[in-house]
Amino acid sequence: MNNDNASITQGSTAKIVEDNEGCKGHWPLLLAIAILFVMLTLEYGFDYIPVFPYNFIIYAIAYLLSGYNVLFLAWSKAKRFAFFNEFFLMSVATLGAFAIGSYSEGVAVMAFYSIGEWFQDSAVNKAKHSIKALLDVRPDEVTVIRSNKTEVIHPKEVKVGEVIQVKPGEKVALDGELVSDKASFNTAALTGESKPDTKQKGERIFAGMINLNTVAEVKVTALFQDSKLSRILEMVQDATSRKSQTQLFISRFAKVYTPIVFALALLVCLVPYLFVEDYIFEVWFYRALVFLVISCPCALVVSIPLGYFGGIGLASRKGILFKGSNFLDVMTEVDVVVMDKTGTLTEGIFKVQEVVAQGVTENELLKLAAVLESQSTHPIGLAVMEYVGKEALHNISISNVEEISGHGLKGIVAGKEVLAGNTKLMKKFNIDYPHSVDAKVYTIVVVAIDNQYSGYITIADQIKEDAPVVITELHNLGIQTVMLSGDKETVVKQVAKEIGIDNAYGDLLPEGKVEKVQELKDQGKRIAFVGDGVNDAPVVALADAGIAMGGLGSDATIETADIVIQNDQPSKIVTAIRAGKLTKKIVWQNIILAMTVKIIVLGLGAGGVANLWEAVIADVGVALLAILNAVRIQKSDI
């Protein structure tokens, strides 16, 4: 079987039947089956067989109705000297049946083969369409505001910088920034999670989100074809063309398998002449035809790619995009998962963790520190302000603010001299503080009021809710876990301890991460790396499976990654592994089923036990069982 025949999964068999729309377009095949049924009823029910040539003409009509496209494809390929394919194989077998007068069996073989192709083609198309439907939610029209008037146009006509209006219940058509003060969106099309996501003015909005509660205005930042959703859809469509090692193996196997089967069929027909005393050519020719029919590799050629389509579709529904079916296989072989910290296992947003006050109330400590920190744009200061809330800071006076580089802030707040910063700031102004403060792992803001130590606030990046769960599940699968981060070593070690990571390394530059991953690869480990930042792109490219955390994350990382997790849940890493394992399991079930049945029936056919009827039923039956098994992937829950 040549490469052309492998394209059965890309629609070559679609020529046999039109697109899957019930019985529409299949009337020749249905008519052929009706003729065959009538003829068999007359023969076996009423013991009536039309005499030659009438029986030949009737069966020939049924044969052509059921197999004219198969014959056409066989002839087209034969003209290019492509003989080792299922179309040529079926044509030889059925025409051979007619040559020895087995008309009903010849028609039956072709009709059942075409029925099998019908089901196979329908299943493949359904799998492809379901994958596309998962993400192709781009609206066909958008309301744009031009000259203070609204205009409904196609999204392709909107330019960068223009403002579009999105009504409640409408899908966002283009990427942009929220111009309105606030709006809530359903992000399921992009992240797989349907819970509302409230966006504030200036935050990024992406095509495919659904506006939930109020009219929102969005300033467009990317053209229609450049939106995140368009790129994600393109990734999924391209994924079906990147074959797994199993698919490539089957293609290579089929190139050897099919010509061998042709040769064996010829030997079955001719070799007995040398050993069998009462050799009858028609008997052994018939056995050779049975041998050819059962050897058709359709069950393998269709069910295996269909299984991988199902795996890609299943993962997509869970918010995971595989850029090729080959990466489904890679995920089953991973024995080390290396992860970035910030944005992957942690939220990437600094939050207040602990407040300890001395000589003042916690509330007063927080308010004075937050008012002072409001004069800074540092993420630590913003975390303190967010924790207290802007409303609580109204009508509190502040003056004489001084920023001391590398130390912190000094100012007069509510008539009191306030210092807020690190321990170096306290030492600079000779303020005594407890030595236990120096032992704190996380970032700390020490506060002094009127030259007296008054307490501290610890600030840290929040660990994601499901981070400890995913580490436990990876360990249960026998997979080692490693964390690499540019954050300080003490913080990295603490996070690793809290969530149960095996090994953790901090204070790493991008090249340091690359070195650590290369060390693991040199040990023969199969590595999946999970990251979300631009600095993670080199490591994502180096790993056996590069995983981008967050389909809305860094463009460079998403482009480089082999797998994209569309939301920020690290637990999807385990889901991706399970999708790969389930797909591989079902694909190999199909391979074993198809090969076992074929070997048994090939032997029975060569020995004269199985006839053409049994051969075609076995072939079509195995193909349908394999298809149903492959379709099961799409219905699975992982």
Image (cartoon, grey):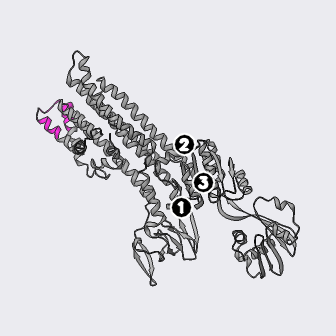
Please determine whether, in this image, residue 66 is positioned above or below residue 483: above
The residue labelled by disc 2 is 333
x, y percent for residue 462? 68, 60
The residue labelled by disc 3 is 570
Please determine whether, in this image, residue 468 is positioned above or below residue 299: below
Q: Nearer the viewer, residue 134 or 249?
A: 249
Q: Is residue 192 magenta?
A: no
Taking the image as drawn, is residue 46 in sight? no
The residue labelled by disc 1 is 556
Q: Nearer the viewer, residue 81 or 185?
A: 81
Q: CA distance from mark 2 to mark 1?
A: 26 Å
- Tag 2: amino acid: Glu
Q: Nearer the viewer, mark 3 or mark 2?
A: 2
Q: CA distance from mark 1 to mark 3?
A: 19 Å
Image mark count: 3
Secondary structure, mark 2, is helix
The stretch of residues the image draws in magenta is 38-60
x, y percent for residue 248? 41, 42
Quadrant of image for the N terminus? top left
**Magenta segment, prevailing SS (helix, strand or loop):** helix
* Residue 386 picture quarter: bottom right
Q: Is residue 43 magenta?
A: yes
- Tag 3: amino acid: Pro
Left of 464 or right of it: where is 430?
Answer: right
